[in-house]
Amino acid sequence: MTNSPQSSSASFWQKYQLYFLLVAAIIIRQIPIVSIPLNWLETYFHEISHGIAALLTGGEIISIQLYATGAGLCTTQGGLSFFITVFGYAGATLWGWLIFKLANSHQRTAQIFSGLMIVLLLASIIFWARDLFTMIIIASLAIMFVMTIKMRRLHYLQLLLKFFGLSILLNSLFSPTYLFDGRDLGDGAALASMTMVPELVWVLSWCLLALGVLYSLIKTNKKSYS
């Protein structure tokens, strides 16, 4: 029995979908205006990861600030400083992996995750945003997820979430290199001061983590369709 052209086309798309989405994420990342919401998304996950690390180690989140440039700041109090600092870039990487995996697992799971993200973003506005522009950015991200959850075909919701996950991973791969600005500021410099381990080591560790996670997704995809 031979496969129909439709089934062959579907299997081809499923097999190479991750690569198409990855290429799309790479291209869109190079487009200044279009890439801004994706930069905000990665920055939000970076900053909320700092905050979550603070909460998990007995601290609290004082405020979260996001800027038009794509930069951000999470101010915390208490908790383990080392864990909080490490978990910014590492946490964003894990968020990217989690979003992709959940979206790839089941349509209903993707829908539930979008709903939970809306709740988290609204909570961030209520409890931790202290300035109007941060509120606007986080509200814009919440609207993005509202739009995804309202999609009638959940297949498209899965695609969009997987695209978000890969975009976050790409940002997590390249954004640590921006710490090499000669100003001795940022998470890498803070960790170097705490541990006497050079900033370069921390930057490479974050980049390698993102690269390893991306490779694991590609490897899993190959096994699924081999």
Image (spheres, rainbow, N blue to C red):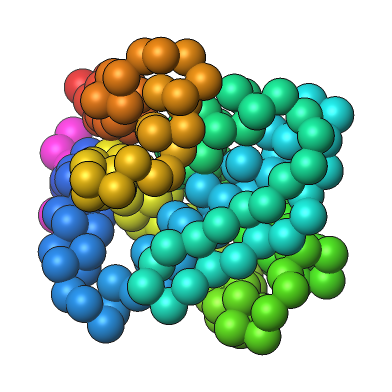
Q: Is residue 22 visible?
A: yes
Q: Residue furthest top?
A: 196
* Vertical side of 74 occupied by 80: above or below: above
Q: Residue at x 69, y 33 (%)?
A: 53
Q: Is residue 220 visible?
A: no
**Residues in magenta?**
1-6
How many numbered callouts? 0
- Spot occupied by residue 111 in the image (x, y as percentages of width and height): 64, 58
Tell me if residue 205 is in the magenta stretch: no
Looking at the picture, tell me which residue is in the foreground, 29 or 186.
186
* Vertical side of 171 occupied by 25: above or below: below
- Spot occupied by residue 10 in the image (x, y as percentages of width and height): 25, 51
* Vertical side of 22 occupied by 218: above or below: above
Q: Is residue 101 left or right of residue 12?
A: right
- Spot occupied by residue 133 in the image (x, y as percentages of width and height): 59, 83
Quarter of the image for residue 137 reads bottom right
Looking at the picture, tell me which residue is in the foreground, 213 or 103.
213
Quarter of the image for residue 57 reads top right
Q: Residue at x 59, y 23 (%)?
A: 82
Q: Residue at x 80, y 34 (%)?
A: 78
> What secondary structure prevails in the magenta region?
loop
Tell me if residue 5 is in the magenta stretch: yes
